[in-house]
Image (cartoon, helix red, strand yellow):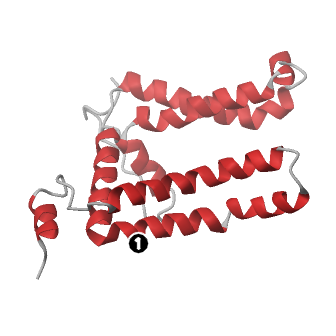
Amino acid sequence: MPGPATERTKAKGAAIPPRLGWRLPVAVGLFLTAIACPVVGTAILASDASGTLKAAAGLLFFPIPEIFDVSAIAVLGKPGREWLKAKLFGALRRAAPPGRVGPTRHRIGLVMFVLPLLMGWLGPYMVGRIPLLASSPRLLHAGGDLMFLPSFFILGGDFWDKVRALFVHRARAVFPERGDPCLPQ
């Protein structure tokens, strides 16, 4: 028979947190410790610590953060995990791009999508012709990444479906008929 925490979670669509008591702060602490491990490991490797300590710091990159993550999930338990999952996916759902976008937004998104790809592809061949590429390539690559990633959200949900269709063997392109409001006039 389900307990009161499970009934409360089901009744409100996981909007009300189950009675986690001490579990939530401990799990959050374990998650934060898992995030801090690689940071501390990097600091140890960058310091002038002994070779033995630097070798041991390697553990802060692979097994130890994963152990803390699994421990946090175990501490939360099933009701806590379901509540946390509902909160995270609810936030992602609110940030999701709209299904259809207008033609101007679509063109802006395409420029933001294609320009970094072209710069990454043609950039090595254009170093001699564009002095900015030779003097600060990391800045241009970072700018391209900052332009490329938001383009997916600007292009909207229909674009995500088109990208997904690239990886589905039986997917087919469906072009709208003339007179369809989706076509540019």
Quadrant housing the C terminus: top left
| Residue under the image location 21 percent in, 56 percent down | 17
Where residue 79 appears, as percent x and y from the top left, is 25, 68
Place of residue 143 in the rendered image (x, y in percent of width and height, measured from the top left): 65, 26
Q: How many marks?
A: 1
Q: Is residue 61 visible?
A: no
Amino acid beneath label 1:
Ala
The residue under the point 15% across, 57% down is: 13
Q: What residue is rendered at 18% in x and 52% in y?
A: 15
Placement of the N terminus among the 4 image quadrants: bottom left
The answer to whether any part of residue 114 appears in the image is yes
Residue most toward the bottom? 1
Q: Is 4 located above or below residue 162 in the figure?
A: below
Quarter-of-image position of residue 52: bottom right
Q: Where is mark 1, residue-wise?
A: 74
Relative to residue 168, is residue 59 drawn left or right? right
Question: Horizontally, is 41 left or right of 29 in the view?
Answer: right
Please name whichever residue, 171 or 52, is drawn nearer the observer in this view of the structure: 52
Q: Nearer the viewer, residue 49 or 182?
A: 49
